[in-house]
Amino acid sequence: MNMPNFRFNLFRRPIFSVLLALSLGFALALGLFALPNQANSAQSGVVVMAEGDIACAPGSKYFNNGKGKDGNCQMQATAALIDKVKPQVVLALGDNQYEKGELENFQKSYDPTWGKFKKITKPVPGNHEYASGNANGYYDYFGALAGERNKGYYSFNLGDWHLIALNSECKNVGGCGTGSPQEQWLKADLKANKKACTLAFWHRPRFSSGLHGNNKEFEVFWADLYAARADLVLSGHDHTYERFAPQGLTENLDTQRGIRQFVAGAGGKNLYPFKTVRPNSEVRSDDTYGVLKLTLKPKSYDWEYLAIPGVNFTDKGSANCY
């Protein structure tokens, strides 16, 4: 009478172990349990690096086979910063190639440096891209990455963030004011957005202490983004680094729902001095080539400005989304 019980107990434990292992395997496959490293990765955020005003013309006296000279043409040095960090996305903030954004120049100057990250790049055009007419070299080089050829504005999602690329060369896309095709598209895009955090980027800044200064042409963009409780705006054009405190519709400090703007135009071509320090400008540097690093988290973001070797400047911080 004892023998059957003995044989059953002998084989029951291995069978149970196999069944348990199979059950756990199915649960993991179905996503019922999250592995610790996956959860930590989601919370750590998506790394984005951004800068504008990047690659000087191969015919420049400072080009020096792409290595730069006399403090100019530092696109190779800023590209090395990106290569070291290895971000998920690169934002090219316009005037990506000088002097007229010619395709040949893109191939000879931008491509060997920042072009290494072309597959993960989300670009916007600048005034130098349109200097040759319809920015043909820019659209030929970036292709579908640049959005529709006659528009240059588009949007995409990145984790818990919605990113919006706008075209600041207004006369080439039917204007940037109220009711313009781009503004109507922007409002519709913002209305459809379901992400918790929003970042917009275009070339010419709304606010700047640099040589070009403030630009009211983009006050409608700013108002639409403000109404939608956007968090960040990135621009270039002035060849400096500048961080503003969150601002409202004018130059008013608004820490409750204002938009924080970065001017990041020190990508390599050359540097500009500051002209008139604007209200709410918190940090500035006009002698530092570098790249802005952003870590976009589910409900917040970190920023850090990375300078090329030999420069003792940085700027870092964190803030929550709205």
Image (cartoon, rainbow, N blue to C red):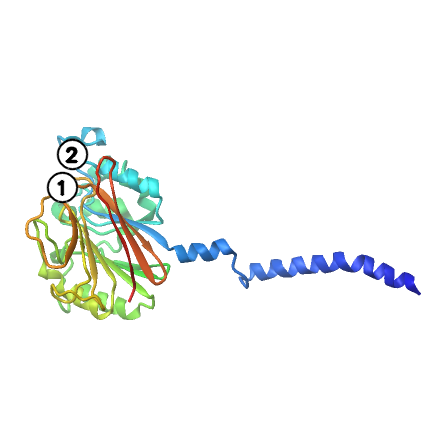
Q: Is residue 77 above or below residue 158?
A: above
**Furthest residue toward top:** 64
- The amino acid type found where label 1 is placed reads Leu
Q: Which residue is mark 1?
A: 271
Residue 48 seen: yes
Label 1 sits on a secondary structure element that is loop
Q: Nearer the viewer, residue 175 or 313?
A: 313
Horizontal and vertical percent position of residue 303: 28, 52
Tell me, for residue 188, which label it has, or none.
Answer: none
Quarter of the rendering occupied by the N terminus? bottom right
Residue 165 seen: no
Horizontal and vertical percent position of residue 44: 39, 55
Q: Which residue is mark 2?
A: 71
**Of the residues under marks 1 and 2, which one precedes in the sequence?**
2
Q: Is residue 244 above or below residue 132?
A: below
Residue placed at 31% from the left, 51% from the top?
A: 48
Q: Nearer the viewer, residue 177 or 204?
A: 204
Do residues under tags 1 and 2 come within 8 Å of each other at their CB atoms? yes
